[in-house]
Amino acid sequence: MECVALTGISDNVMKELKNHVLRTIEIRSPQNFFAVLKVNAGDYVFITHASAQDVTGGTVGVLARVLKHQISTHSILQSNEVFYEEREMTMARIQLEPRHITRITKVLCNEVGEVMRVIVDKTSQYEAR
């Protein structure tokens, strides 16, 4: 199954996804943010703690279905008598339905500035054959 990969996700988040506890995550890293822009509700994503540079065939992660996603921008203001500073931060929130733990069979695209696309096993890593 071909899907978008989200990489560098913290171990705590991965643990909660594996236990089907966590449902919504916030994405702030640029690589993952642009990946989330390319997915729609109903699409599948592969989520792993491995960094984008370390993702290869055999990398283990969680396959999850996207239930919904939203993009939001927050503005932060800071000032005193000398200066006035305004910063904006844009982030994505995606609500997930974790399906099972699986592994990558092939990396299709892993270039900087591009959305990482991978092919993953359709069956659970722990399913007996």
Image (spheres, helix red, strand yellow):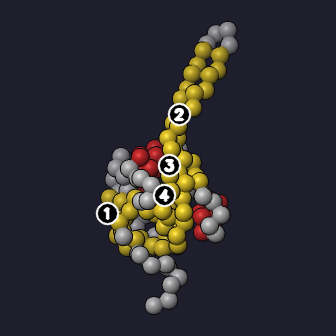
Residue type at tag 1? Leu
User: In whole angstroms, how far apart are the C-alphas of marks 2 and 4?
Assistant: 21 Å
Residue under label 1, please give it: 108
Q: Which mark is residue 69?
A: 3
Pick the quarter of the image with the C terminus: bottom left
- Say left or right for 20 vs 118: right
Q: Give the CA distance from mark 3 to mark 4.
A: 7 Å
Mark nearest the camera among 2 and 4 is: 4
Q: Nearer the viewer, mark 2 or mark 1?
A: 2
Q: Secondary structure at mark 4?
A: strand
For the residue marked with disc 3, what is the amino acid? Answer: His
Q: Examine the rendering and report whether any part of residue 11 can be seen.
A: no
| Image coordinates for residue 65, horizontal then vertical, percent | 48, 62
- Residue drawn at x 58%, y 52% as measured from the top left: 25
Of marks 3 and 1, which one's residue comes earlier in the chain?
3
Please state the horizontal and vertical placement of residue 128, each as a whole percent of the image: 50, 89
Ranked by sequence position, the earlier of labels 2 and 1 is 2
